[in-house]
Image (cartoon, rainbow, N blue to C red):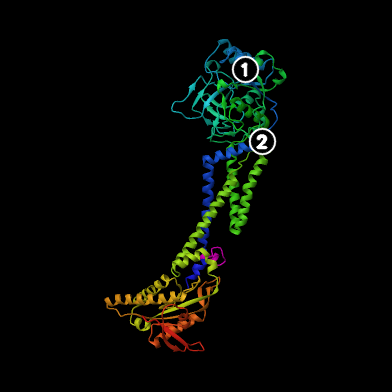
Amino acid sequence: MAVMNKINGTARSHSDEFQPAESMAVRRLRAWLYASVFLGLSTWLWFWPSWHLLEEQFRDVLNSRFAVSGTTPSQVLLVDFSDASIQALGGWPLDRRQMADLVEELVGPLGAKVVGLDMVFPEAGDPVGDARLASLAEHGPLVLSHVLDMQQRSTPIRVGVPAQQTAPPQLLTHQWGVQPSFGFVANHAGLAHARCVGHVGVLLDADGVVRRLSPLVQGPGGVLNTLAAAMLDCGQPGGVAARTAAAAEVSHASPSTWRLPFTYGVKAFDAVEAADVLAGTVDAARVKGKYVLVGSSAVGLSDYVTTPMQALTPGVLVHAEALAQLLDRGVPRPDDQYQFAVLWVSGLWVFVIWLLWRRHKAAAWAVALSSALGWPALAVLAYTQGVFPWALFVPAVVLVSLLSITALEFKLLRDIKLRALSTLSQYVAGPVLKQLYAIGLTRSLQPQLQDITVIVVDMRDYTRLTSEMSLNEVADLTRDFLALITQPVLQHEGTLDRYSGDGLIAFWGAPLPQRNHADLALECATSLQQALANWNAQRANKGLEPIGMRMGLESGRALVGDMGNSARSVFTAVGTCINTASRLQELGRELKCDLVIGPNTAALASLALTPLAMVEVKGLRSALQVYTRDNS
């Protein structure tokens, strides 16, 4: 049958026969679909907050297992107002003269390079102590802190008097975008002329963990470095800043963040008690030439945050980590400088996987799975070398894209198969079609020898009936007759082989074996006669001439299946029984009988048949006993 070319071609979606049928437009459409899948998924992953949180948590695990150093930062010292120190010094808030004594002891006899206070004094205290602190802040290596609120609120927080900064930031200026602030907690007016000021605001991720800082934040009095960078500016003007000037060339209009590596553990930093400093019992060798951060681990002061190091981390340790990283590695790069590189790597890798997919799908899956496992392994190696790449994004995009492409391919193939089945359903009965689908179209359409019963149907006197009709009338008559004789074939689980002008050839017993194929064919013949009688009754009501038809049936062994090639595929049956059924249909004219049944069908039938005649059939050596049915 002619349409089987299309059916078989679509059924074998990946065979050589199918590929040429795929137009260039279809291939381009699929390519665009795959590209859209990648772009959509990568964009979705990139902007999906939960994905970033998963990535961050995975990096935390890598960091804790592979990147934490066991060494102590040699240039950083912590002075801790612990619960024990606060109790020994008479409670909190500390007398401002004691705070001045502490700073003077650190920068004087003990020889600290810079002292940074991770605390804010929004209210004035003892005038003498405040005056001494103000003098140290204006002329000495003392860095004060402001808390800048980077969250926009209905009622902005404004406490204290922001410092009118006289020394602009030197470190982390050129390559970092400036984060706006919407409120502040500053020191009192007596400390407003401090030379060195840093901000101690932190950024919380969605899970409440502090992983990054905003190095530059716009405060009321100007742009402030983070406390750690401000200490380096204050203690080494032209030092670290000069060493890292070459790295500070890129300008960013949007705010930038710095993800702290947290390569030092909670207990890695050298720390002394504030009470011991004031008591003069601290060895000067532990302080001399170091950057000293003064903060508090006292539970009552609640200066705790959650970090990748531990759930409750004293806030001063975050700034200690930032200070140690700046001293060890110089100016880092903003997080967003790596984003486009990650997207490019992801896109390139998905493109490679797609090329492999077009050639060999198993190889594409193997490479995708290998990269999904290998990329995190490379990330682990990078962590051990102090590099902090995106560990999950690339393999995730590759795997999700490949899964989506596979799903899309499956859907396309499923649509193709459904279209093939829809077309095939016009020629094969529904129950047979379901079994073909379950077995597999390719397997069930392969040529094989099967026992079948063939029916050949033809319109009687077609030439005479159509000789005086118009073309439209001939087309309508032919179309209506073919529709009339097709439906009973499909209703009785037959397979339509082909139309032959004004008739058809159909068979039972293939593509699926049927034990009662002869009875099914005979029942179909009876239905055909009844359908013709009903149609003729309708024609008579319209004043039209009745239509007659002849049928020939015979059973036998035949080769049934796809007999085509790469150029044209045809599902048909080849065997003596097909030719015999055709001859019997023609003999009906001489026998004055519309239904002529061959001896092989009669032998298989369980229905009652009536002997008709012994006939000579062209192509056969011996005469045949033929039959008919009483109601014919």
Residue 64 locus on image (x, y percent): 64, 35
Question: Closest to the observer: 595 or 392?
Answer: 595
Residue sitting at 63 percent across and 13 percent down? 101
- Assign a secondary structure to mark 1: helix
Left or right: residue 66 versus residue 205 is right
* Residue 17 is one of the magenta-drawn residues: yes
Residue 406 locus on image (x, y percent): 55, 54
Residue sitting at 67 percent across and 15 percent down? 108
Per the picture, the main secondary structure of the magenta-coloured stretch is loop
Amino acid type assigned to the residue bearing label 2 in the image: Ala
Residue pointed to by mark 2? 67
Highlighted magenta segment, given as a residue range: 10-20
Amino acid type assigned to the residue bearing label 1 in the image: Ala
Residue 441 locus on image (x, y percent): 52, 66
Q: Quadrant of the C terminus?
A: bottom left
Query: Above or below — where is 578 with respect to 411?
Result: below
In the picture, the disc for residue 84 is: 1
Work out whether residue 384 can be spotted. Answer: yes
Report the mark closest to the observer, 1 or 2. 1
Q: Residues within 10 Å of mark 2 (few under 14, many from 20)?
A: many
Work out whether residue 344 can be spotted. Answer: no
Instruction: Tell me if label 1 and label 2 are in contact, CB under 8 Å.
Output: no
Query: Above or below — where is 496 with respect to 281?
Result: below
Question: Closest to the observer: 48 or 484?
Answer: 484
Q: Residues within 10 Å of mark 1 (few under 14, many from 20)?
A: some
- Assign a secondary structure to mark 2: helix
